Every structure is written in C-alpha cells, then in structure tokens.
Image (tube, helix red, strand yellow):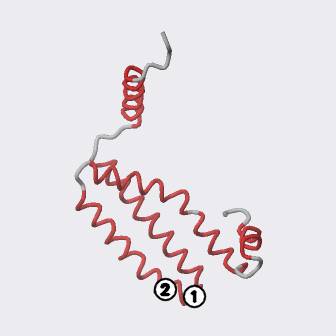
Amino acid sequence: MLIFPESLLHILYKGRYDVGASILRMFSFLALIVPWNAVVSSYMIGMGKVKQGFVAGVGLVVIALPAYVILIPLLGGLGASISLVGSIVIVTLVMVLYLYRTLPLQPGNVIRRALDAWTFIKRLIPLEEK
C-alpha cells in the first residue's frame, strides 16, 4: 500500500478510486504504528494504568480535532488522513515515553521472561517421544 497504491486501487476498483492513492499511502503508515499502540495500550491496562489510557484517548481527540480543522480545508481527504496518522503517532510516542519512565521494563528483562516461558512450555509439552 505504501509503494504501489495507485496500481492496487486500479486493480481492485477498476479505476474508480485512483484519486485515493495518496490517502491509502498515508494510511499505510498505520501498519507501523497501530501494532505498537496496541501493545503499549494492552500493557498499560494490564498494569492497572486504565486512567492513563483514558487520558491518552482523550489526548488523541484533542490533538486530532484541531488538525482536522486545519488540514481538511487545505488538503481534503489527504488532510484528514494526515491528521489521523499524525495524532496516533504522537499519542503512541507519548504513551511509550510514559511507560518507559514509570514502569521498570527493560528489553533484557523481556527477553529473559520469554526464555522462561519457552522453558515452561517445553516442560509442559514434551516434544520428543520416548
């Protein structure tokens, strides 16, 4: 969707929506940020940070609304897509920074926990027949 949105739209919709290629290209960036946002949001909820997750949701609206008001009259649908993607990127980065500063999560600890989980699974389900 990022590299060939024109061709994709032309093949799927037989040329009816070729003008939407720039919007589709902008939305393709969500494929990079939405999984990150989902993991951070789930982690926040799992750690009991529901209030902060709610504040992030309100922050998304507070950031997106002015961006919509400014960019939609200037760029139309492309402005709307830029506003949405930009707002989600900003909120996700703020949530990541918040978690990094408030919770003791280090990449090494995550890797060690993953190895512990793998060891547990191997003990629970023997992969070799005796």
Q: Position of residue 42 (x, y in %)?
A: 34, 52
**Residue at disc 1, secondary structure:** helix
Which percent across, then down, holds residue 1?
Answer: 67, 64
Which circle marks residue 74 in the picture? Answer: 1
Residue at coordinates 72% horizontally, 76% vertically from top-left? Answer: 13
Do the CB atoms of the residues marked 1 and 2 lie less than 8 Å apart?
A: yes
- Say whether residue 18 is left or right of residue 62: right
Seen from the viewer's position, the closer of residues 97 and 54 is 54
Residue lying farthest bottom?
73
- Up the image or down, 103 lies above or below 59; here it is above
The image position of residue 103, as x and y in percent, is 28, 45
Disc 1 crowd rating (10 Å Cα; few below 14, some 14-19, many 20+) is: few
In the image, what residue occupies the spot 50% across and 15% down? 128
Residue labelled with disc 2: 70
> How far is disc 1 from disc 2 in space, using C-alphas?
7 Å
In the rendered image, the residue lying farthest to the front is 130
Mark 1: amino acid? Leu
Say which of 124 and 25 sits in front: 124
Of 130 and 57, the residue lying toward us: 130
Res. 117 image quadrant: top left
Quadrant for residue 17, please give it: bottom right
In front of the other: 3 or 121 = 121
Q: Residue flagged by tag 2: what amino acid is it?
A: Ile
